Image (cartoon, grey):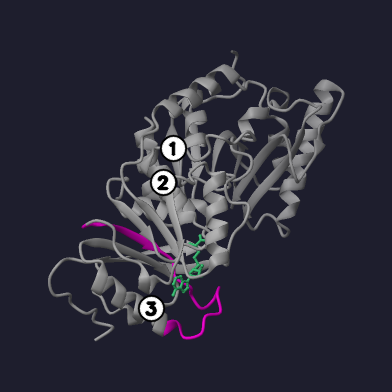
Amino acid sequence: MKNFINYKSFIAKTQFGLENVLAGELEKYGAKNIKIMNRAVGFEGNKELLYTANLSLRTALRILVPLSSFNISNAGNLYKKTFAVNWVKFINPNKTFMIESVVNSKLFKHSKFPSLKVKDAIVDKIRESRGKRPNINTVEPDIKIHLHIQNNSCRIFLDSSGESLHKRGYRLEGFTAPLNETLAAGMILLTGWNGDSNFIDPMCGSGTLVIEAAMIAMNIAPNLNRNNLGFMKWKDFDNELFNNVKNKLTENQKELKIKIYGSDKSSKAVNIAKKNAQRAGLSNKIILERKNFTDVDKIGGNGLIVTNPPYGERIKERNLNNLYKNFGDVLKQKFTGYDAWILSSDKEAMKNIGLKTSKRLTLFNGALECKFYNYKLFKGPLKKSKTAQ
Ligand SMILES: C[S@@+](CC[C@H](N)C(=O)[O-])C[C@H]1O[C@@H](n2cnc3c(N)ncnc32)[C@H](O)[C@@H]1O
């Protein structure tokens, strides 16, 4: 199949704090020249890798393909240099498109203005050569273009993912403050776990962490069932290659050899988690129960706990300090041998956990800055954290 796009260098976008795990994922799939950037990772590969990456990466939000980059000094310039791109190669006049822009430049007072200029240039160029123009669709465009302007530097990309890759499709319902799927997967990968020991989330809400954990343990590509990836609307979409990539990923799936357990005190949350697990095709792989965390027991001698308890800003819980103290006590009394990780934005409440923190990473849950705390629950006397003493 003839390629219209240069399938060589790509940029996978992610969220703050997940750049290194994303780079690790890319390495696993054979990406070359991996470069860590700010909330993104640059890499090189080919068309097959681009398809594989979109279906498989757990911590990428979208993958962009660079189309053109140039310097600009004003809006006229931006129009002219965008017009110079051979847009008919990428967009048919009967397709729709939209532009998503990130503009950080003194050249423009209004951030929407440059994307209007770019839109005009694309439409004019296609009309000039094909006698017909493509329409704009900001809801479900066939082709999504990204415009990044930083001072004088302008870069234009094609979005190979379309809808963000965190939308795996299994979570139609969320309970209060569900985690973004990409963040949930990133949290699990940051712990270094690869599905070799039991996994517990005793405050599982809508089940995002347990579902992502099951997919990691079984090597299931999280977007294997997505049929609305951006590149599927491109002129050079290779359906045969796409099916081969999907078959290969399916063959690489593994049986689940460990236990994955989620519970929540709310029966509504557990019902939602069950429905989400079912949509992910994992209902017989994940144990889900309504339980207060005080009644949860460990499974086996060691394992991993990853959870995000309620925190003040997003969930109105009375007496959060008590909840965190009780949770710390449960970890101490019942989970020796386990590795526990807690995501929370509530530094005050976290002081009540009363365990020595062995790692503290910064992550963002939406716009909310959180810390991801690690507690190694070794056998033997446990030291109290300095803050809790
Ligand atoms: C921030 S939400 C978790 C969201 C979840 N990670 C998701 O992606 O949907 C916190 C959860 O803790 C649960 N919770 C609060 N207190 C609890 C307790 N004592 N025992 C068990 N679950 C509790 C709440 O019902 C809520 O579902």
Q: Earlier in the sequence, mark 3 or mark 2?
A: 2
Identify residue type, mark 1: Ile
The residue that disc 2 covers is 214
The residue that disc 1 covers is 220
- The disc at residue 174 is none
Q: Which residue does the image show at 36% across and 49% down from the upper left?
A: 20
| Distance in Å between CA atoms under marks 3 and 2 | 26 Å
- Residue situated in front as seen by the camera: 128 or 95: 95
Q: Main secondary structure of the magenta part?
A: loop
Total number of numbered discs in the rendering: 3
Question: Does 366 sit left or right of 363 as displayed?
Answer: right
Q: Position of residue 250 (x, y in %)?
A: 45, 28
User: Do the CB atoms of the residues marked 1 and 3 lie less than 8 Å apart?
Assistant: no
Q: Position of residue 58 (x, y in %)?
A: 46, 44
Q: Which residue does the image show at 28% across and 58% down from the upper left?
A: 299
Give the secondary structure at mark 1. Answer: loop
- Residue situated in front as seen by the camera: 229 or 6: 229
Residue 321: quadrant of the picture? bottom left
In the image, residue 165 sits, relative to residue 48, either above or below, namely below
Q: Is residue 24 visible?
A: yes
Q: Position of residue 312 (x, y in %)?
A: 51, 78
Density class for disc 2 (Cα within 10 Å; few <14, some 14-19, many ≥20) is: many
- Residue situated in front as seen by the camera: 66 or 378: 378
The residue that disc 3 covers is 324
Segment tinted magenta in the rendering: 301-321
User: Do the CB atoms of the residues marked 1 and 2 lie less than 8 Å apart?
Assistant: yes
Identify residue type, mark 2: Ala
